[in-house]
Amino acid sequence: MVSDLADLNASLDEARPAERDFRRRYEGFDTEQARVSRLLELYRRRERLAVERSQLDIPIPRRKPDEKAAAGLDGPTAHTYAQSVQGVLEAWGFHGKPTVSFDHEAQDIRLKGKERSADGKGVRALLQAAMKVALLVYCQEQRRIHPGFVVLDTPLLTYREPLRSKHGELSADEQALKDSGVAGRFYGHLAALSEIGQFLIVKNSDPPAEALALANVQLFTGEPDDGRYGLFPRRRAG
């Protein structure tokens, strides 16, 4: 029994070098397999990048000198946007029933089927403001990207003094707009939209009294030592 155990130990001692060599070669195979797997993945990535690069190398077709760029809105988008403009005008209490449609040829809105250019300057200014505000509302409702602020330059041009204005007397539609009292509702509506955007209104006449409680009014005097000089600080000499 003792001799059998001694023989078994001797056999194990003889087998240990072979076992160590086998284990070393096995570990080498495992390392080599991992290296080959990484190389195969790199080859696959190179092939994908080569395909993507070949797509980038496709020349961009250029328009011919007399070819116009494709522009404009598709029918459903134009209709939805026109409805947004109509909703804004209704919120402002625009006189009459402001039925708005979109003119695909002119890429502009129509009010009651009439071109916007056919209205007086005051009405055109208000419609232009409504289009800008409606774009913000449309983008918010349709989850489209919008910078989140709107700049309106003299949107209430109708509320001018005809005798002192370079635009002259009020036209009939301008007078109807002025008599409708849209100014207060205009500021109220923009205040209600303050959660989705910021509105910067530039105008040369004082806003109505009811608007002062809804808006931050900043007077630019143009005088160096009287209030705020302008949108940008006055540059000091020297």
Image (tube, rainbow, N blue to C red):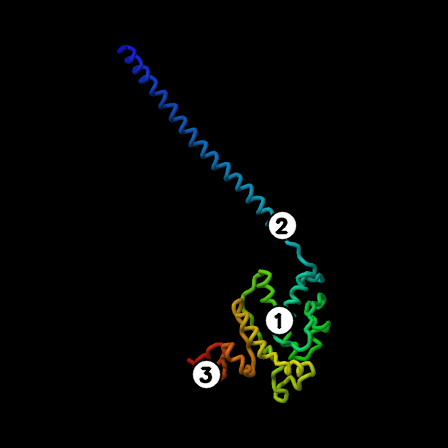
Tell me which corner region of the image, top left, top right, bottom left or bottom right, holds residue 47. top right
Q: Residues within 10 Å of mark 1 (few under 14, many from 20)?
A: many
Label 2 – label 1 distance at C-alpha:
45 Å
Asked where in the image residue 114 lies, by quadrant, the reply is bottom right
Q: Position of residue 14 (x, y in %)?
A: 33, 17
User: In the picture shown, does residue 189 fall above or below 68?
Assistant: below
- Where does the N terminus fall, quadrant-wise? top left
Q: Which mark is residue 160?
A: none
The type of residue carrying mark 1 is Val
Frontmost of labels 2 and 1 is 1
The answer for how far apart the CA atoms under marks 3 and 1 are is 34 Å
Q: Report which residue position mark 2 lands on.
A: 58
Give percent across and percent down for residue 135.
Answer: 60, 67
Amino acid, disc 3: Gly
**Residue at label 1?**
88
Mark 3 or mark 2, earlier in chain: 2
Q: Name the element at disc 1.
A: helix
Of labels 3 and 1, earlier in sequence is 1
Q: Assess disc 2: are there few (<14), some (14-19) or many (≥20) residues with their C-alpha within 10 Å of its C-alpha.
A: few
Neighbourhood count class around disc 3 (C-alpha, 10 Å): few under 14, some 14–19, many 20 upward: few
Query: x, y (%) of residue 124?
Result: 66, 76
The residue to which callout 3 is attached is: 227
> In this rendering, which labeled residue sits more in front, label 3 or label 2?
3
* Circles 3, 2 touching at the beta carbon (< 8 Å): no
The foreground one among 72 and 58 is 72
Residue 158 vs 49, above or below: the answer is below
Residue lying at 56% horizontally and 44% vertically, measured from the top left: 50
Q: Secondary structure at mark 2?
A: loop
Question: What residue type is disc 2 on?
Answer: Ile
Residue 40 vertical placement versus 60 (above, below)? above
Query: Label 3 to label 2, Cα distance in Å?
Result: 59 Å
The disc, 2 or 1, on the residue closer to the chain's N-terminal end is: 2
